Amino acid sequence: MTLEMIFVLSIGCIIVLLLFLSIRRVAENAESLPKQQCCAAKAHIQHYRTAAEQGNAEAQYFLGIGHLEGEGVPQDQTKAIKWFRRSAKQGHAAAQYVLGNIYCTGEGVPEDKAKGIKWYRRSVKQGLAEAQHALGWHYFYGVGIPEDKTAAVKWFRKAVKQGDAGAQYTLGQCYFAGEGVTQDSAVAIKWFRKAARQGNPLAQYDLGSCYYYGIGVPEDKAESIKWYRRAAGRGHIEAQDLLGYWYFDGIEVSQNRAEGIKWYRRAAEGGSVRAQESLGTFYFYGTGISQDRTEAVKWLYRAAKQGSNESQNLLGVCFYFGKGVDKDETEGTKWLHKAVEQENKFAIELLQIIAKGDKAATVHEYRQAAERGDAEAQHQLAKCYFYGFGVSEDWTEMMKWYRQAAEQGHAEAQYLLGSWYCEGGVGVPADVPKGIKWLLKSAGQEHAEAQYCLGIYYFDGIGVPQDKAEGIKWLHRAAKQGHEGAAEVLHSIEQK
């Protein structure tokens, strides 16, 4: 496992934390268009124009949706708002609700939460469940109106009585966190289940998390996977990311790297920086997939733009050495410096090598010392073969020199050798037992990254029998050295 790939291993440990935080996602759940009406608009938009111009409120509403979505008519937010306003003024509940969303979010109009709340209130008087849910959300967080969690729950319950899946999920979150109601995990599960059965992906994901960790229900991994898969199938990015991780590394399911890549790709296309970084890294090294540097650059660029320092580092390598993209040392250096700003040690080391200037002379210097048995020179020469710095890229030579350095007790070389054997790629078939052997040697020398890797491997049972106590032991050793990832995973475990 290279450093660029390590981040994916903490996902399983942080799901509990995500579960507690997921109430924050209610906003997007509460502010959606009524689905059945949206579909109708897409199918019949052209039939509504004449009726809308004659003052028909329903037709005005559907014409507004058409312009908002660009279905059947040119997308034009200004025209959409015009038709929503005309419809809403005639008392159309759904138009009032949508207009409330528009003013509260400031989409196409100056943000005016008070005006948005006014339109929600008009809509709820007519009993629209989506508006009841949205008004409850604004009370819950005190957005545009004074915070009042009791009032929020009242509106959630009104929407729930109409079978609104989003409100069922939100009410479940209230019970789960004890916000506005007495905390009751069993009742939370009841509402999660109702919403999940109606296809709400947020509820499906959280229900899967509850089964995975035995929160409010008996622990049941099979039931957990079932709900995670349903959430992922409905576009839940975190669920897709999680399934990608599980299938790729064989956690809780039989290892199937093709299936893992499939889910990573879906999550990456949805904007997950973790999945984008994973795909870019897999394509770069040829891990679990045919090596394709052009494809690697595509995904690394997306992740790097979102601030992933590991992707910034690897993207810098691609540009500087012309791997999968036209060589551009200036662009490469730019991305390496961005990675350095986040203290990426590989970027720091590469820039130090680059600063030496004369590539041929640098390689000659390293080679002479390496052949005399200098472990650090062997380590540096291996890097040159990895990057193609002053020599042609040659991973066989790279592994040869890393192995020689590792056999002399070089902790960093031991860590890298162990990582690559564990994951495969760089021209090396995966050999987890051999990888663990090298990671243990490195970790024994207090190499924090090696300790972190061992912690994740043992905690999640990746390539070794699961041993959570052993995993936590290594995570603690890494955290004591200031490893932020290890500290975050330990905190997530304690949250459970």
Image (cartoon, rainbow, N blue to C red):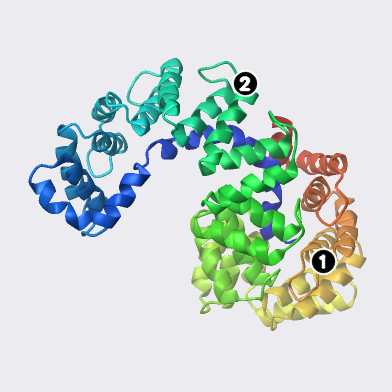
Disc 1 on helix, strand or loop?
Answer: helix
Decide if residue 377 is on the left or right side of residue 358: right
Query: In the image as oriented, which residue stretches furthest toward the left?
Result: 54
Whole-percent x, y for residue 459 in the image: 81, 45
Identity, as a three-letter code, of the amino acid under mark 1: Tyr
Decide if residue 360 is on the left or right side of residue 104: right
Work out which quarter of the rendered image holds the C terminus and state it.
Answer: top right
**Among the 4 quarters of the image, the one containing residue 70:** bottom left
**Among the 4 quarters of the image, the one containing residue 194:** top right
- Residue 71, label in figure: none
Question: Residue 357 or 100: which is nearer the viewer?
Answer: 100
Count of marks placed on residues: 2
Question: Residue 156 or 274: which is nearer the viewer?
Answer: 156
Q: 10 Å neighbourhood of mark 1: few (<14), some, or many (≥20)? A: many
- Which of pointers 1 and 2 lies earlier in the amino acid sequence? 2
Question: Residue 170 or 15: which is nearer the viewer?
Answer: 170
Identity, as a three-letter code, of the amino acid under mark 2: Asp
Instruction: Residue at 77%, 74% (x, y): give it.
Output: 381
Whole-percent x, y for residue 369 in the image: 84, 75
Instruction: Residue at 51%, 33% (x, y): give it.
Output: 169
